[in-house]
Image (cartoon, rainbow, N blue to C red):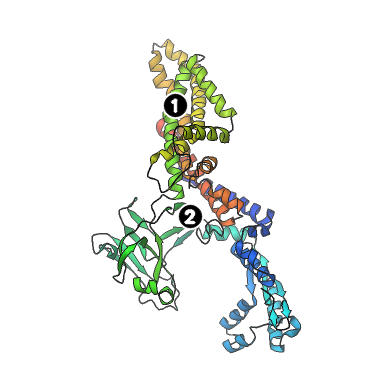
Amino acid sequence: MTKYVLKRLLHGLVSSIIVVGIVMIMIYTMLDRNLIFAQDPVFKNLGNNEKTSYMYRMWEEYGYIDLFTYTDYLLMLQANGEIDEDTRKSVASIGKKPESDSAKVAEYVQKYQDYCDANGYTVVRLNAVMVSPKKYANGGKEQLFASKDLPITHRLISYITGFFTVDNIHYVDEDIDIGERKLTFTLHDPIYGGKFAPAIIGNGTYHKYLLYVDNQFPFIHQNLLTINLGKSYAVNAGVDVSETMSKKQGSYVLKTTTFPTGLTEESADDLHTAVFVTGSRETNKVNADRFTDDYTGVNTIKSGKSKIGYSFSIGIVAVLLSYLIGIPMGIAMAKNKDKLIDKIGTVYIVFIIAVPSLAYIFLFKAIGGKLGLPTTFDMESASKLMYVLPVISLSLPSIGGLMRWLRRYMIDQMNSDYVKFARSGGLTEGEIFRKHILKNAAIPIIHGIPGGILGAIVGAIITERVYTVPGAGNLLTIAISQYDNGVIVGVTLFYAILSVISLVAGDVLISLVDPRINYSGKAR
C-alpha cells in the first residue's frame, strides 16, 4: 500500500507540473501581454516614455521578460572592478537623444549595446519628449534599457524550485548591522509576558517568530517553511496566493498589546507575524516607539475567516448534508424500484440535471428571502443563518448525484449472480442487502468522499458569487478577468494538488472498506 501511495503521489506531482506548464504556455504565449494593463490605474495615468518604461517593468514582474537597464550594466561593471564609482556616475546620464551623448557616455552606451547583443537582449532607447527646449513633456525623460523574452522552461523551473522557502539567519543582507545572527528557543514567549509558551525566535531571519504557540487553532504555528504559490499583482497586489487564500478577513480585533519597547496600547497587530523591514524604525516614528529592531512588518488580527475558511465551512456542511440525505434516499429508491418514492426521487434527479445550476440557485435564493433568511453574506454578522442558503444551494446537486449513482449501483448488484446464489443459500433479504448489495454498491460512493471534502476548500464559483461569500471560489475567475498571471498559475497548481490527494485518498479509503481491493500487487 505504501509503495502504491508513493507511486501515485509521484505521478500526480508530475501531472501537476505538466498542468502548470500548459497553463503557463497558454498565458505567456497565447494571450496578449498588453491585457495586463487593462485595469491598471498607474498605467493609465502615465505618459510618453514613462508609460513604455512601466510596461517593460511590469512585464518583468509578470514573468514575461528579463529586463536589463543601462544602470544595471554600469553597476555590474563597478561590481566586477572594471570601473570605479566616479566613472559610473560620470557616464550614468545619457543625452536626450544619441547625438547629444558625450564621447565618454557614447563609448559606454556602445559597450552596453554590444553586451546586450551578445547576450540576446534587444536594446530600447527612448529619446526625450520635450514641450520646449528646456522642459520635458509629462513622462518624457529619456530612457535606455534592454529586454529579452523568458522561455517557458525557465519560468516553470523557477516556479517549481521556488515553491518552498526555508527561512534562515542569513536572510537579512550582510551589510546591515543587526547584531548576532541566531535562533533562540524559549519556553516563555515575551509576547505573553513571560508565561509558559514555547517559541523559536530568529535574528537575521525574515520572520521574527519561526515557531510559536498560541490559543488559536491549530495552536502550534510555524513560519520556518513558506509555500509560494505565486505573487499577485492585481487581485491582492504584492501578496502570495497562499497568503491571499489563508489570511483572515473582516474587521480589526483590538486587544491590549505590549510592544517590545514596553509601550502598551489597544492594537490589532499580531506580533507573532513580524517580518524584517529594512530601515523601518528610522523612517517611521510609530515603529520606533513600538519596536526595538526592524522586525516591524506585522499582520493584523481580524474577526472573520480566511477565503479558504469560508469556502470550507460552507462546503463541508454541504458535503455532510449531501451524504446524510442522498445515501438514504438512494437506498430507498433502489429498494422500492418503480414505486412512489423511486418516482419522486427520479423527478428530483431530472430537475437537478435539467435545470441550470444558476437558475435553481436564484430560485432558492428568492424562496429563502421570502422566508426571512439572509440572501447575502455578511462577515460582520454573528448569525449562522447566512450559511443556510449557500449550503442548500451547494448540497442540492450533490444529493441528486448520490441518489442517482447509488440507486444504479444497488440495482446492478441486486441483479448479480452472487445475490441469486445467496438467496438460494438461505440468506434473508436483509442479510443479503446489508452484507453484500450495500457494501459493494457503496464502494464507488466512498471513493468520492475525500474529493468532496477537499473540493470544499476551493469553494464554488457560482454559489459564492450569488450569495457574495468572501471565499476561494471567486479567486480564479477574478484573476482571469484581471489577467493576474501569478494568481492563475498558483490557483491552478493548488487545484491540481488537491485533485491528486483526493484521488489517492479515495483509493486508500476503499481499500480499507473492502479488503478484496489490494494495491500491493499480491493476492490475498
Which residue is label 2 attached to?
244
Residue 517 lies, in percent from the top left, at 45, 31
Given residues 41 and 227, the one toward you in this image is 41
Given residues 377 and 82, the one toward you in this image is 377
**Quadrant location of the N terminus?**
top left
Image point (43%, 39%), residue name: 387
Rendered image quadrant of residue 277:
bottom left
Q: Specify the label residue 327 is tagged with.
A: 1
Amino acid type, mark 1 = Ile
Residue 148 lies, in percent from the top left, at 67, 67
Secondary structure of the residue carrying tag 2 is helix
**Quadrant location of the C terminus?**
top left
Query: What crowding class fits label 1: few (fewer than 14 Cα within 10 Å), some (14-19), or many (20 or more)?
Result: many
Give the residue furthest to the left.
Answer: 195
Which sits earlier in the primary sequence, circle 2 or circle 1?
2
Judge left or right: residue 59 versus residue 323.
right
Given residues 189 and 463, the one toward you in this image is 463
Image point (46%, 45%), residue name: 6
